[in-house]
Amino acid sequence: MAAGMSRTPRLLTLWCPDWPVVALDLDPDVPAAVLAGEDVFACSRAARAEGVRRGLRRREAQRRCPDVRIVERDEAAEVRAFEPVVNALEAVCPTVEVSRPGLCALPTKGPARYFGGDEALVHVVAEATHDAYRIGIADGRFASAQAARRGIVVPQGKSAAFLAPLPVDLLDRPALADLFARLGLRTLGGVAALPSRQVASRFGAEGIAAHRLARGLDEHLVASRATAREIVAEEVLDPPVESVEQLAFVAKRLADTLAAELAAHVLGCARVLIEAETETGEKRSRLWRYDGAFTATAMAQRVRWQVAGWLEGPAAERPSSGVARLRLTPDEVHRGAGQQLRLFDDATGSVEADERAATVMARLQGLLGFDAVNLAVLSGGRGPAEWARLVPWGEPRPTPYDATPPWPGRLPAPHPTVVHDPVLPARVVDGTGTDVLLDEHGTISVAPQRLSIRGGRPVAITAWAGPWPVQERWWDPAAHVSLARFQIVTADGVARLVATGEGRWWVEGTYD
Amino acid sequence: MALAEALVRPGTFAAPDVLPVAPPLDALFPYGGPARGGVVSVGSLTVALALLAATSAAGGWCAAAGLPDLGLAAAADAGIDLQRFVVVPAPGEQWAVTVATLLDGVGLVLARPPARLKASDARRLAARLRERRGVLLLAGDTAGAWPDNTDLRIRVEASEWTGLSDGYGRLLRRRTRLVASGRGAAARERRVSAWLPA
């Protein structure tokens, strides 16, 4: 493992900002936003200048920028438009790995020597891609991606020094960044300087991954490639298939098989080789990278992207017949299927215990279903139902925009040990039996004196505090939520988290 | 037994065959912690989470089964490492199989038993517990749910919250008096005053 750690690959990253918008080939000065569902998924620079941001609702984007051009996301178009770029890169170096349309990387080792150094390689790549992208080189994937954002070449062995002054937010782990900030660690250099052993015990697996990134290493220790190559999912299609839809269906089946196989070996896969071949031997193979570990769904999506880019891509590149053979090979695997299990690059904890737990979770998923076995992830939000969510074991960690602190109005610890779902309807009255009402200023009409839950016997309130008002989505009258929370202790000694809104009361949590 | 080794830190408790528990809750157990292979019913989720947290802090895995409304933020507050905390919210009809499977790889399992647990299922689970040297915590006051009673039963005898008054402050923690009673060495009732959450 120690040998694996020291070999951090030197990579060239090519990145196109706002690819989903760029792929549409619009006038760059037109403010445009690409929607996924009802949320802004990407926007043009002109739209960003008007305050449009990723994650906004359609209506809010239109409010901030009334003449914004709204376009539905078209993944097929994104893939098609990126296809010529990857083809051009593959002429420079055959092992291009694609993370998603708009972002890819290649190892510089061979090509840099061939073309006469890093700067020369950047020049060659820029020319091959018509100077339309940002290009950077550094040791390690994370540093290389950061170098691409800035369009620079970081000298060999200097990734840690390059990353040191950059802010911790770049780790894309908001909860951890928050924690680091509270400890006074604002730069990646500060995080990198922490002793590994303490990172493992204080911040867990997330911390270990962040610590590795901050030091310019890759997120995972890569397990043996030989193990990975023994696990292959392949299907011969007879007759050959020309429809992308049908191929996507086959891809899902293959990906499911592969995911099950990887889970059985307690391995996560960060890079997969997808090969599609026609009867006459025309072939399109590509490496796909995934941040974390591929799920079956994510893997099937990459297959779909690849075959769509081939079958529906530039006419000159299209195969003469349908796909006759599809093969998925995990090219880079690490210990711990899916979830980031602990990495143990220090002698903390027991790999064996983790593997046994992982095996048990995989068995339970077989018994109860994939969604039945979970790990919890803390998330943002003011209400108890939003404080944490369950992620099926094997799914990657939620993306950063899922948890965006801070949340004013959120109650501090202790949190209720029981979070009622559904909430329990309740009544809160004063001494004379009159309902306690909350006005629009967040003031209550009378002091609460009795609580009854689900039509039960009213119990005397011995202590209470509140209101903690919540105003969510104030800009959107349809989704506007106006409610307030109270903590209430009753004569039986039980404390509860109680909420009211629009004349009704309900119990959200119990401090059992 | 790598898991067992991971959980036992020599010198921190009286007997070698118990899970670690931090004071003052350790005084509830005759040997300073839940005996491996046993079943403990716990009348307060805050207490149960504190017991899980002690195992988690020692590097072990723990799990919760059949508790769809468990407050996960509270679990994190208690100090449980969520990366090593398996949550099976609704095992349904498969409750006994789920708990038995969990015990194969997880040292400490908190579970709320179904209203009618079959005696045969309970016997099989008890055998699995002894074989795997795990500990099962039953959530709630489930004295009747487990045949022949559990090895130990922890109840909240008295509880007083602090931090709140009429419209001011916020919940801080509560002063509790906990009682533990059970079989064998635990036959004598043990009382502990504890601030919860710790």
Image: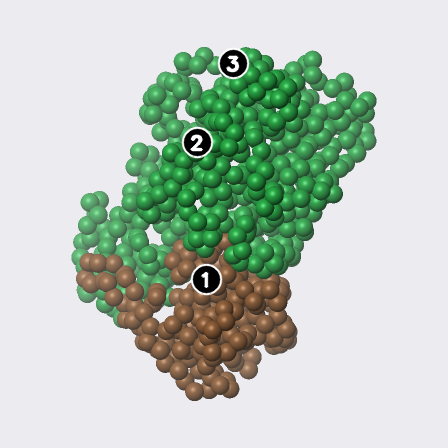
Chain colours: A green, B brown
Kind of residue at badge 3: Asp
Q: Which residue is mark 3?
A: A131
Cα distance, mark 2 to mark 1? 35 Å
Rendered image quadrant of residue A95: top right
Say which residue label 1 marks: B57
Q: Tell me the residue at 47%/70% (across/down).
A: B20
Residue in the picture at 31% in, 49% down: A410
For the residue pair B116 and A86, the one nearer the viewer reads as A86
- Quadrant hosting residue A84: top right
Please, which chain is the residue tagged with disc 3 on? A
Residue plotted at (49% across, 42% down) = A212
Q: Which residue is mark 2?
A: A162
Check the residue under mark 1 and report the chain it is in. B
The secondary element bearing badge 2 is classed as helix
Q: Are marks 3 and 2 on the same chain?
A: yes
Query: Relative to A292, does residue A43 appear above or below in the rendering?
Result: above
Q: Quadrant of the C terminus of chain A?
A: bottom left
| Mark 2 Cα-neighbour bin, 10 Å: few <14, some 14–19, many ≥20 | some
Label 3 crowd (10 A; few <14 / some 14-19 / many >=20): few
- Percent x, y for residue B100? 61, 67
Q: Amino acid at mark 1?
A: Ala
Mark in front: 2 vs 1: 2
A163 lies above or below A449: above
Residue B22 horizontal/vertical position (percent):
41, 70
Could you say where residue A37 lies in the image, as x and y percent from the top left? 48, 32
Query: Is residue A476 rendered to the left or right of residue A421?
Result: left
Which x, y percent locates residue A248? 67, 32
